[in-house]
Amino acid sequence: QVPLVESGGASVQAGGSLRLSCADSRSTHRTNCLGWFRQAPGKEREAVASINIVDGSTYYFNSVQGRFTISQEITNNTVYLQMNSLKPEDTAMYYCAALKERGYPCTVVRAQYLWGSWGQGTQVTVSS
C-alpha cells in the first residue's frame, strides 16, 4: 500500500484554481511534517508548501505564497493544496511527501533526502 496518495490534478487555464489532496494512510511512525513538492519537465523537484500536522503551522516556498494554501483535515488524514491564480509556470507533477525523521523543522525542504513516502504524483497543467 502506498502511504501517501495524491489526487486532484487536472488541466486548467491560467487564472484558474485546483485543489490537490494527499491521503495519508500511514498507521505508524507518522512524523510531524507533510509537504507538497513539484517537478516540471527538465527541472529539479522543488518544494511548494509544508505543514506541521500537529500544530497546524504552514510554510510556503518558491513564490507560491498568496496563491497557494496548504491545509489539513485531521479526521480523514488528508492534506490539501488549494491553488488559485494558476500560471503556466505552475505546470508540473505535484507530489506529497512526509519528513522521515522527527527532530527536523518542516522548513527543511531543500534536503529532500529527509523526505520519504513519496506518492505517485498528480499532474497539473496550466495553459495560457
Image (cartoon, grey):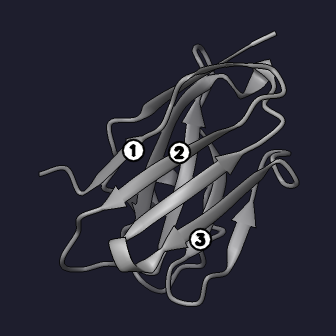
Figure quadrant of residue 124: top right
Q: Sequence-wise, which precedes: disc 3 or disc 1?
A: 1
Q: Nearer the viewer, residue 80 or 94?
A: 80
Q: Position of residue 84 (x, y in %)?
A: 78, 41
Looking at the rendered image, the disc whose residue lies closer to the viewer, 3 or 1, is 1
Is the C-beta separation of discs 1 and 2 under 8 Å?
yes
Tag shown at residue 6: 1
Residue sitting at 81 percent across and 20 percent down?
14
Is the C-beta separation of discs 2 and 3 under 8 Å?
no
**Height in image: 58 above or below 121?**
below
**Height in image: 42 above or below 109?**
above
Q: Position of residue 126 (x, y in %)?
A: 70, 18
Tag shown at residue 26: none
Residue sitting at 23 percent across and 64 percent down?
25
- The answer to whether residue 52 is left or right of residue 128 is left
Residue under pointer 2: 20
Secondary structure under tag 3 reads strand
Residue sitting at 36 percent across and 69 percent down?
100
Figure quadrant of residue 116: bottom left
Residue 1 visible, this angle: yes
Q: Nearer the viewer, residue 27 or 15?
A: 15
Quadrant housing the C terminus: top right
Is the C-beta separation of discs 3 and 1 under 8 Å?
no
Label 1 Cα neighbours within 10 Å, binned few <14 / some 14-19 / many ≥20: many
Cα separation between marks 1 and 2: 7 Å
Q: Sequence-wise, which precedes: disc 1 or disc 2?
A: 1
Q: Position of residue 109 (x, y in %)?
A: 61, 58
Residue under pointer 3: 51
Q: Position of residue 49 (x, y in %)?
A: 66, 57
The single residue placed furthest to the left in the displayed view is 1
Secondary structure under tag 2 reads strand
Looking at the rendered image, the disc whose residue lies closer to the viewer, 2 or 3, is 2
